[in-house]
């Protein structure tokens, strides 16, 4: 369901509106005068609107709804703190946004009998203004059905191909031709995870032993790959929701205890940058550590890292946090500490020169918006979905 600026008078409280999934509705249904018998004649004349062109402050909230089979992606205008549209999705959708913001897409799964029956995986591409489908592409049933992780699905830098991770029965990456609107091939890879595109024919993955995998492929899905050196010790546990900028080709990956690993792919090869500790020894003794779902964001314009964190017990790294720590990515120096005053599951940062910090609370069903420089809360969008969890901003 896509709903924007729905305005109703108080007399509409008894009206059940049926609004379906392909349209943005504005103006709502305005009831006529009540009759002598206390009944109302109601008319429903929806007006179809387009969203404004997307910019750096367009943000998408994915609501996987705790593994419900009917879910949604919510489009939000960060400039005006306005909910623009809802787009219907299936079981644990994986969202992506084009580099120019003109379209967004998701890889999703539905079943022939709602929650059972024949499984059907597909890719849907939607226009970011009209929210009409541009493409609906059937793919093999390859998706990893785990509560939505970023970078299990990704776009190549030219926005012409989608890469989809397969976990079982063997590791693989599905290649989808968005221009040709077809599935190309499942490409075999070793026991590695996540997909970080660095060129239109190249992506990197993170492997179990702690090294990275460089994979190069052609338009037919023929692939070759090679391992890099070790990024981190095998007993150093990394969170499974890192931050990656396709435009900057920069990977930022925190460990459970706050060691920040960074990789620069701008040369085409994996250049491992110096690691740094997000917290002092004293803070670690006080149990400060990263926590949340999308718990790290990278701002390429200022080369800053935003880390969601709190004082927490061990193995609670998926729990919400109430603070964001900001670091200079080049030096590891802490620049600020922002108290959010809300239990936040996920963060993102707009890519403009004066960025907004987005903080999503699944419990509150609210997106809180902050000035990233001052840490001041400036606005919020309430009533988002049922269990909203994932934030996707334009890079």
Image (cartoon, helix red, strand yellow):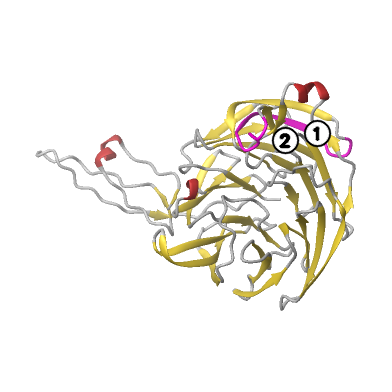
Estimate the x, y position of residue 129 in percent, counting from the top left: 55, 56
Q: Nearer the viewer, residue 122 or 352?
A: 122
- Mark with earlier residue (1, 2): 2
At x 77%, y 56%, the residue is 207
Q: Which label is found at residue 327?
A: 1
Which residue is outermost to the front? 235
Judge left or right: residue 359 versus residue 202.
left
Residue 20 found in image quarter: bottom left
Q: Which label is found at residue 307?
A: 2
Task: Give above or below for 370 relative to 89.
Answer: above
Tell me whether circle 1 and circle 2 mark residues in contact (CB < 8 Å): yes
At x 60%, y 40%, the residue is 79
Judge left or right: residue 339 versus residue 335.
left
Badge 1 crowding class, 10 Å Cα cut-off, few under 14, some 14 to 19, many 20 or more, is: many
Which residue is outermost to the bottom? 220
Q: Which residues are magenta?
A: 314-331
């Amino acid at each position: 369901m896509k709903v924007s600026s729905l305005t109703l008078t108080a007399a509409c409280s008894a009206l059940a509106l049926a609004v379906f999934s392909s349209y943005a509705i504005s103006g709502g249904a305005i009831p006529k005068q009540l009759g002598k018998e206390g009944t109302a004649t109601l008319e429903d004349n929806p007006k179809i609107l387009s969203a404004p062109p997307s910019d750096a402050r367009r943000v998408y909230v994915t609501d996987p709804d705790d593994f419900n089979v009917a879910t949604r992606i919510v489009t939000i205008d960060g400039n005006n703190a306005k909910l623009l549209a809802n787009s219907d999705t299936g079981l644990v959708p994986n969202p992506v946004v084009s580099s120019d913001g003109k379209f967004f897409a998701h890889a999703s799964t539905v079943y022939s009998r709602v929650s059972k029956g024949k499984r059907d995986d597909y890719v849907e591409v939607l226009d970011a203004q009209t929210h009409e489908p541009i493409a609906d592409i059937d793919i093999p049933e390859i998706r990893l059905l785990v509560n939505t992780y970023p970078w299990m699905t990704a776009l190549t830098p030219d926005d012409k191909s989608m890469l989809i991770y397969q976990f079982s029965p063997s590791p693989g990456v599905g290649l989808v031709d968005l221009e040709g609107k077809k599935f190309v091939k499942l490409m075999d890879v070793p026991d590695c995870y996540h997909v970080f595109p660095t060129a239109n024919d190249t992506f990197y993955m993170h492997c179990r032993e702690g090294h990275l995998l460089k994979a190069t492929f052609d338009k037919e899905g023929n692939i070759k790959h090679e391992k890099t050196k070790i990024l981190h010790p095998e007993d150093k546990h990394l969170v499974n929701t890192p931050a990656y900028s396709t435009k900057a080709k920069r990977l930022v990956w925190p460990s459970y205890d706050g060691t920040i690993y960074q990789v620069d792919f701008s040369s085409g090869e994996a250049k491992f940058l110096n690691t740094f500790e997000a917290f002092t020894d004293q803070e670690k003794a006080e149990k400060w550590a990263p926590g949340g779902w999308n718990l790290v964001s990278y701002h390429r314009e200022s080369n800053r890292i935003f880390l969601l964190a709190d004082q927490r017990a061990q193995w609670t790294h998926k729990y919400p946090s109430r603070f964001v720590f900001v670091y200079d990515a080049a030096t590891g120096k802490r620049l600020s500490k922002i108290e959010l005053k809300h239990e936040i599951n996920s963060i993102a940062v707009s890519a403009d020169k004066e960025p907004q910090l987005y903080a999503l609370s699944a419990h509150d069903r609210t997106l809180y918006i902050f000035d990233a420089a001052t840490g001041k809360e400036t606005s919020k969008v309430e009533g988002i979905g049922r269990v909203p969890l994932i934030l996707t901003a334009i890079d």
